Image (tube, rainbow, N blue to C red):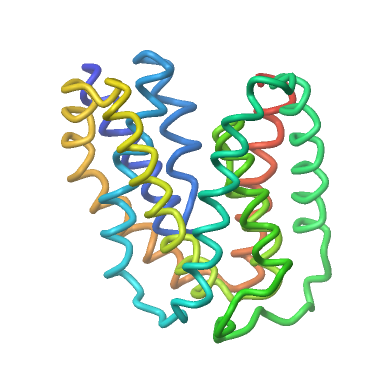
Amino acid sequence: MTEYAIIAAIGFIAFILKGMIGTGTSTVIVALSALVIEPKLAVVLAAFVNIYGGLAMLRVDPVPIANRYWVAIAITMFIGSVIGAMALKVIDNDIFKVILGIAFLIVSAQFLLGNSNKKAGKSTAPNSANIKDLGVGTFAGFCGGFIGVNAPPLMFHFGRHLNKQNLRRLLTLIFIPAAIAQTVTFYFNGMLTTQVITYGIIIIPAMFLGIYLGNKAHNLVSEELFKRIIAIFLLFISIKLIIFG
């Protein structure tokens, strides 16, 4: 199997997860692509494909969410990302990864062991974000800027209040501006190379198929099983942070 075929296969797996829960693309692409290409290029590739991957997701399930709600959260994520990137200079990255990994492990346990009879999240998203929503958005942005993982805080907080459709829609919307900002930064830093763009183009067909299958799975699973899938995803991230950094 050639390098390009492997990248396409990785993209396919990543977008099945994206289509199902609205996130996970970066985690899968960075973790697996780094085995066959330079790790830094894997990070750039993940940001690049998240732009058109997010745009493709907009057409999958157009659940209405108020702009005042998701835009405010997206802005705080951007601010948190800047703070997280700056924190790399003064905070031990490895120690923070372990601490965060332990926290995510606890969160995944709460999802797995939670009350199965707990009612599903709201069928409609709020009209505006509250202070807690903005705080979580800022912290998620910080995590993304510092260690490249921003989904778990968002999934834990918003997953308790929104049903699976609204949660997936929110994640889709707020990740697009972040992906654009990251890709533009990589371009001006000279990291968005022709090779990365080529990898991204190769992933496109696999992306559409992955999103299609992931969306089918999303529609078939119950709210409870959806929470379990989130828990397994968080468990995977926590183990990766604690053991592999």
Question: What x and y, as percent, mark residue 19?
Answer: 39, 58
Write down the quadrant of residue 39 in the picture: top left
Question: What x and y, as percent, mark residue 27?
Answer: 50, 37
Vertical position of residue 135 compared to residue 51: above or below: below
Q: Going 64% across and 52% down the picture, which residue do you hit?
A: 138
Q: On the rendered image, what quadrant is the N terminus found in?
A: top left
Vertical position of residue 8 compared to residue 165: above or below: above
Write down the quadrant of residue 243 in the picture: top right
Q: Is residue 47 left or right of residue 194?
A: right
Vertical position of residue 206 compared to residue 199: above or below: below
Q: On the rendered image, what quadrant is the C terminus found in?
A: top right
Question: What x and y, as percent, mark residue 58?
Answer: 31, 67
Please state which of residues 63 and 133 is positioned toward the viewer in this rendering. 133
Q: Going 37% across and 35% down the picture, which residue do you hit?
A: 46
Write down the quadrant of residue 206 in the picture: top left
Q: Going 57% across and 56% down the picture, which residue do you hit?
A: 76
Please state which of residues 51 and 214 is positioned toward the viewer in this rendering. 51
Number of callouts:
0
Q: Is residue 221 left or right of residue 202?
A: right
Please state which of residues 19 and 185 is positioned toward the viewer in this rendering. 185
Question: What x and y, as percent, mark residue 219?
Answer: 44, 72
Please state which of residues 187 and 9 is positioned toward the viewer in this rendering. 187
Q: In this view, does 169 lie to the left or right of 47?
A: right
Q: Is residue 19 left or right of residue 130?
A: left
